[in-house]
Image (tube, rainbow, N blue to C red):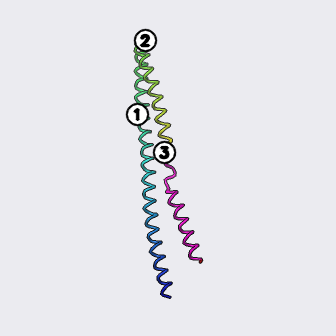
Amino acid sequence: MNDTHKLVNDLSEQVSRLVKDELRLAKLEMAEKGKRAGFGAGLFGAAGAAAFFGGATLVAAVVMLFALVLPGWAAAAIVAVVLFIVAALLGLFGKNEVKQAKPPVPRETIASVKADIDMVKERARR
């Protein structure tokens, strides 16, 4: 009876330690996903800023076109096109970063906890 009591105590301590370790792992995994999502959101913000400046430059090009200053509007149009291309690239990269952070659940930790529970169940059956 004393051996059983010791085994139960040991099992309880090991399960407690295992749960704490798994929670720590989940916290680290969620922090990493949060960083990735934040970086992607920052790229989206940069894409918005580049698009804004592209639009402003395009407006300047239209104004210059109406003023019939051919070299000025041509230069402004070229800058606008380049800024829109930059905005598109930043937007795509930002989308990919946010997509990789989804879903915001610690998959690896959940799988590890399930495996640990299965192992404990298997040992308890013996």
Q: Quadrant of residue 57?
A: top left
Amino acid type indicated by mark 1: Ala
* 23, 59: nearer the viewer: 23
Residue 106 falls inside the magenta stretch: yes
Amino acid type indicated by mark 3: Val
| Residue on which disc 1 sits | 49
Counting residues from the start of the chain, the first of labels 1 and 2 encountered is 1
Query: Which label sits in the foreground, 1 or 3?
Result: 3
State the mark number for residue 98: 3
> Element at badge 2?
helix
| Residue on which disc 2 sits | 70
State the separation of the CA atoms marked 3 and 2. 42 Å
Principal secondary structure, stretch drawn in magenta:
helix
State the separation of the CA atoms marked 1 and 3. 18 Å
State the mark number for residue 108: none
Question: Residue 90 appears at what percent x and percent y?
Answer: 46, 35
Quarter holding the C terminus is bottom right
Amino acid type indicated by mark 2: Leu
Question: Residue 50 appears at what percent x and percent y?
Answer: 42, 31
Question: Residue 104 appears at what percent x and percent y?
Answer: 49, 53
Image position of 119 (left or right of 53): right
Query: Which label sits in the foreground, 3 or 2?
Result: 3
Give the magenta range: 101-125
Residue in the picture at 44% in, 65% down: 21
